[in-house]
Every structure is written in C-alpha cells, then in structure tokens.
Amino acid sequence: MKQSWIIGNWKMHKTTREALEYLERFLPLIKGREQNVGLIPSFFSLSAVSERLRSTPLLAGAQNMHEARDGAFTGEVSALMLKEAGASFVLLGHSERRHVFHEGLAQIHAKLKRALQEDLRPLLCVGETELERLEGQTKAVLEKQLGTALEGIEKQDLETLLVAYEPVWAIGTGKRASLEEIKSAHQTIQAQIKKLLGKKVPILYGGSVNEENVETLVALEEVDGVLVGGASLDPESFALIVQKIYDAQAR
Ligand code: PGA
C-alpha cells in the first residue's frame, strides 16, 4: 500500500500568529495520520512553524530559495538559511515562480543543484500552460522542464527528489485536470525520470485539489500524493484531505 504525500503550500498567506493558530486547530484533527504530511509557510513564519512541528512527524518546507550559497542578493534567501530555520524540503519551479517571477529553466536547475548540495530535499514542480496543452505540447514541455532541471546531476544525489505535476491552468482556478490527463502526464514524467535516474520517484499532483476530489486522485496508481494550495489554508479542510487520504489507504 502506497503512503501518499500530502503537502500544503500556503503561498503568501498567514502571518506567524495566524500560522501558529492554524496549527493549534490542525494538529489535533490529524492525530495518528501525520506521516508524509508537510506544510510550506512563508519564509517569515518558517522558524516558528518548524519549531511547533518539531515534536510531530510533520515536515516544514520552504516555497523558494536563491541558487547561490550566499552573497550580495538583497531580498533573497539561501538554502542554508532555510535549513537553519527548520525546512527539510524546498519547493522549486512552482508555476508562480516560473510565470509570475520569470524564473527560467537554467535558474531552476541551479537552484536544484544548490538545494542538493546543501542537503535540502527538492520538490520540483513541472506543468504546462493552457496554450501548451491546446497545442499538444504537454509531453514535450514536461520532458524539457525535467530534463533541464536534472541535467548533469549525479543519480545518487537525487535519492530524495520529489516531483509535482501541476498544470498551470489548474492552479487556483477550480479547473482540475481530468483523471486521464493526470495519468498520462504522470506516466510521461515517470518515464523520463526512469530514463534519467533508472528508478521511480514520488510524483504528486497539484492544481485545484480539495476535499471533494482528493480520493479519486490518490486512487490513481500514478499519483503518489497531492500538493494543495487554496484548500490547505483552512485547517478543517486540509485535515479532511489528510483524513480522506489515510482512510482510502486503510481500505
Ligand atoms: P491550488 O494551488 O490548490 O490552489 O490550485 C496548488 C499549488 O499552487 O501548489
């Protein structure tokens, strides 16, 4: 029986006080269902959140990082800083980073390399835009995003890699990809990973996941978990997602 990953990405939501209040409501609701559950707060509340999670199996992650070890990069945050603040993984290549902040393929590759060097587990996001899907480019886009991100990195350094398939058009829109689209994208990603690494890695699905659709998603053999944005902001909703996945796994 697979153990699904359940990661909540809070994006630019919640002050530290709000994040801690959230945890006081959320943690009792998921007692006994805490393995492979992660939360990604803002940089600013990462220390407080990871400190609160320290006595639990839950993981704290970061939403982004700079590719340099350190240096004159005003406003940026390094992998070392994130680790010291308690992050055990980092989101890289999220569609908002690629499309709103114009992060390119080479930069995402450099970030991934740096994260691995500093022993910070990467959760690499890949996904096509609506136009790329309409033009039949989905497979090529996914292969390119993966290929460039992982290029030249030693297989043994990628032991901890997690990947998320997040079609850009499904993020925050309520328009989840169909099960067929998800299956086929995950198969493309897994085949490419197999070619590059000679083994499988967990592939999460993200994009309008909620408590209504999560069971059907994790029932797919190809889906190893979910990356949840909007529906992770409310502790009751996110706890319901965790409960539903655990209950499905127990059946
Ligand atoms: P969403 O966001 O669940 O709000 O669609 C997912 C994500 O951006 O990771």
Image (cartoon, rainbow, N blue to C red):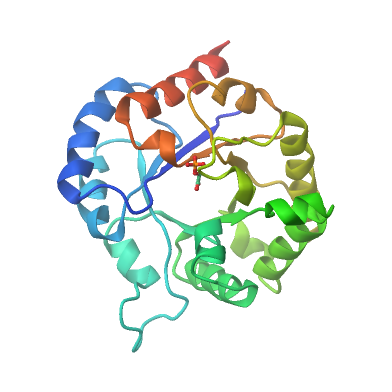
Q: Which residue is at a point 26% across and 41% down the rendered structure image? A: 53
Q: Which residue is at a point 56% across and 64% down the rendered structure image? A: 99
Can see residue 248?
yes
Q: Which residue is at a point 60% across and 43% down the rendered structure image? A: 170
Q: Position of residue 93 (x, y in %)?
A: 55, 62
Q: Position of residue 186 (x, y in %)?
A: 73, 42
Q: Position of residue 74 (x, y in %)?
A: 31, 83
- 79 relative to 135 in the view: left or right: left
**In the rendered image, which quarter is residue 78 located in?**
bottom left
For the C terminus, the image quarter is: top right
Q: Residue furthest top?
A: 251
For the N terminus, the image quarter is: top right
- 11 relative to 153 in the view: left or right: left
Q: Is residue 1 above or below residue 138?
A: above
Q: Residue furthest bottom?
A: 72
102 or 184: nearer the viewer: 102
